[in-house]
């Protein structure tokens, strides 16, 4: 057998409808390919969603990952807010098909890898070489005999001098292994390098440099330790901060401001500012401008009074312009009494001090014109 028999893992796909017309439905499938659409031929049929095509999308299993493919050209598939044509889905991820939001949950089972069978050892029969002779064909003198087979020869052999040493031939493979284990003596090139005078010089220089660096970088034992900084107490820090020049200047400035606030001039300015704010909220912009002007005369750097004076002037001019336009409208509608009333209000608002104002002159001429029109003289 080429591989071991494996059990097919159980596949389970669960699609839950989170939002949409089919909310609450759950589809349990055990297929590697799931089709979604409005048509009855699909695995998941969404009849109540008008934004779903007949064959909208399909989910397929590719390399233990599910991918969704958009089959519709008119309607889209959204995953994480993006319009996708093909997308790899993660477990517990949500996606939109039309107005329906799905949540996918799947279990692919445990992946089992195929196990190949172990190879058995094979016996190879060696063939003898054609030139070699069998052991039985050798002569008795050529066959080596052990010491037990020749006792008489050893006993009858006369004693002779020392036997000369003959080296035993060693196979090539054993010679190679022995050469690797035996340390070789230094070669002529290495011995000449050690005896070279420059080698000694460089060795001495490197040793001296290493010793110099060691003594320079090592911490000095007899070095005087730096004195620790005294820890300041809270009272000391406060006193130092209070005695600093910026703090003294700030305290002096605050004292001067407090002294100015207690002065009668400042109190009078604040009183007029409060009156001006009350008239500003009631819509009496002319009186409010008078109070703000008094405040600016007493304290020219009063920013709030300056700002509200400007706002009062702008709104007063807008009110005058609105009454002039309303009087002109009444004149065109032949309501001459209301026309005269509007223009007289403009004259009263501007007062006798602004008799040279163009708007005052316009209102006065319009009052006369409205009176003549009311009498029938135009």
Image (cartoon, rainbow, N blue to C red):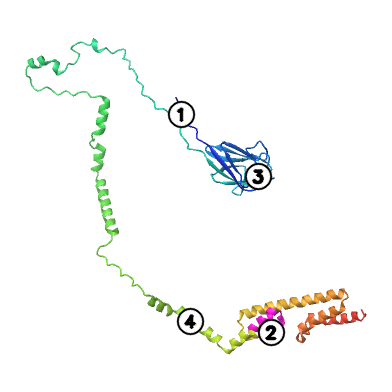
Numbered marks: total: 4
Mark 2–mark 1 Cα distance, whole angstroms, equals: 104 Å
Mark 3–mark 2 Cα distance, whole angstroms, equals: 68 Å
* Left or right for 120, reference 256: left
The residue identified by callout 1 is 5
The residue identified by callout 4 is 251
Callout 3: few (<14), some (14-19), or many (20+) C-alpha neighbours within 10 Å? many
Helix, strand or loop status at disc 2: helix
Mark 1 and mark 4 lie on one chain; the one further toward the N terminus is 1
Mark 3–mark 4 Cα distance, whole angstroms, equals: 70 Å
Mark 3 and mark 2 lie on one chain; the one further toward the N terminus is 3
Mark 1–mark 4 Cα distance, whole angstroms, equals: 92 Å
Residue bounds of the magenta highlight: 273-288
* Left or right for 262, reference 195: right
Mark 1 and mark 3 lie on one chain; the one further toward the N terminus is 1
Looking at this view, is 127 or 38 the one in front? Answer: 38
Callout 4: few (<14), some (14-19), or many (20+) C-alpha neighbours within 10 Å? few
Q: Which mark is residue 290?
A: 2
| Mark 3 in CB contact with mark 4 (< 8 angstroms) | no
The residue identified by callout 3 is 76
Whole-percent x, y for residue 6 in the image: 47, 31
Whole-percent x, y for residue 94 in the image: 58, 47
Is residue 252 shown above or below 99? below
Looking at this view, is 294 or 177 the one in front? Answer: 294
Helix, strand or loop status at disc 1: loop
Mark 3 and mark 4 lie on one chain; the one further toward the N terminus is 3
Q: Residue at x 28, y 61 (%)?
A: 219
Is residue 172 shown above or below 70? above
Helix, strand or loop status at disc 3: loop
Quarter holding residue 174: top left
Residue 173 seen in this snapshot? yes
């Amino acid at each position: 057998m080429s591989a071991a028999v494996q059990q097919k893992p159980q596949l389970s796909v669960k699609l839950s409808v989170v939002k949409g017309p089919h909310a609450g439905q759950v589809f349990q499938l055990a297929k590697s390919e799931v089709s979604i659409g409005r048509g009855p031929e699909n695995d998941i049929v969404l009849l109540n969603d008008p934004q779903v095509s007949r064959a909208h999308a399909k989910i397929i299993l590719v390399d233990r990952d599910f991918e969704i493919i958009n089959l519709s050209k008119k309607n889209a598939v959204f995953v994480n807010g993006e319009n996708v044509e093909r997308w790899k889905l993660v477990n517990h991820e949500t996606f939109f098909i039309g107005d329906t939001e799905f949540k996918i949950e799947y279990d692919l089972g445990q992946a089992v890898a195929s196990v190949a069978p172990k190879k058995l050892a094979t016996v190879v029969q060696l063939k003898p070489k054609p030139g070699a002779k069998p052991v039985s064909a050798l002569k008795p003198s050529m066959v080596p005999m052990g010491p037990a087979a020749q006792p008489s020869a050893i006993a009858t052999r006369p004693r002779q001098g020392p036997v000369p040493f003959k080296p035993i031939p060693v196979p090539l493979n054993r010679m190679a292994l022995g050469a690797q284990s035996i340390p070789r003596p230094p070669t002529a090139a290495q011995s000449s390098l050690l005896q070279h005078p420059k080698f000694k010089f460089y060795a001495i220089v490197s040793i001296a440099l290493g010793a110099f660096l060691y003594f320079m970088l090592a911490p000095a034992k007899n070095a005087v330790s730096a004195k620790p900084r005294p820890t300041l107490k809270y009272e000391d820090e406060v006193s130092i901060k209070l005695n600093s020049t910026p703090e003294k200047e700030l305290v002096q400035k605050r004292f001067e401001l407090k002294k100015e606030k207690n002065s009668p001039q400042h109190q009078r300015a604040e009183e007029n500012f409060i009156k001006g704010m009350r008239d500003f909220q009631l819509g009496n912009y002319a009186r409010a401008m008078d109070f703000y002007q008094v405040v600016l005369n007493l304290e020219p750097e009063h920013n709030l009074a300056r700002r509200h004076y400007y706002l009062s002037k702008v709104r007063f001019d807008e009110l005058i312009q609105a009454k002039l336009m309303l009087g002109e409208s009444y004149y065109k509608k032949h309501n001459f009494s209301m026309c005269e009333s509007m223009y007289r209000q403009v004259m009263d608002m501007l007062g006798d001090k602004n008799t040279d104002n163009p708007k005052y002159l316009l209102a006065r001429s319009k009052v006369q014109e409205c009176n003549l029109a009311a009498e029938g003289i135009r």
